[in-house]
Amino acid sequence: MRDTVIDTICDAAEIDKDIIFISADLGAASLDRFRRDLPDQFIHAGISEQNMVDLASGLALSGKKVFLYAMAPFITARCYEQIKS
């Protein structure tokens, strides 16, 4: 299912240059196509999910359509640390 979602977003991003994909995980093989074919629309944020969400917010405010990918526990819980701190 993960691969299908990423492939679908990649297909859409080939048409719409405002789509940006931000990932905290390079382990998914389905990300290879995105990195290779659309390097200007792919950002690897590293293991810094809270900063990834901050970056996505700024891009969205500037008109980009942003998709985030990370492991579920980290993309949810780590982001709360920005609010808590």
Image: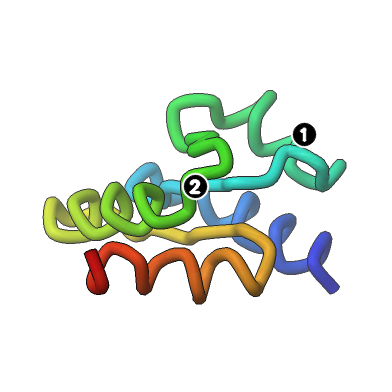
In-front residue for pair 82/28: 82
Disc 1 marks which residue?
32
Question: Would you call the spot at circle 1 few (<14 residues within 10 Å), some (14-19), or many (20 or more)?
Answer: few
- Residue 54 at x, y percent in the picture: 27, 54
| SS category of the residue bearing label 1 | helix
Residue sitting at the far left: 62
Q: CA distance from mark 1 to mark 2?
A: 13 Å
Res 29 → quadrant = top right
Given this view, does label 1 or label 2 mark the residue nearer the observer? Answer: 2
Residue 44 vertical placement versus 70 (above, below):
above
Residue ID for mark 2: 22
Element type where label 2 sits in the image: strand
Residue displayed at 35% across by 66% down: 81
Which residue appears at 36% of the width and 58% of the height? 53
Q: How many marks?
A: 2
- Point out residue 9 in the picture as x, y percentages from the top left corner: 60, 59
Q: Amino acid at mark 1?
A: Asp
Q: Up-down: is 32 above or below 13?
A: above
Which residue corresponds to the image point at 73% horizontal and 42% vertical from the top-left? Answer: 31
Asked if one can make out residue 14 in the rendered structure from this viewpoint, the answer is: no
**Please, what is the three-letter code of the amino acid marked with disc 2?**
Ile
* Relative vertical location of residue 29 with respect to residue 57 in this rendering, above or below: above
Q: Residue furthest front?
A: 85
Q: Residues within 10 Å of mark 2 (few under 14, many from 20)?
A: many
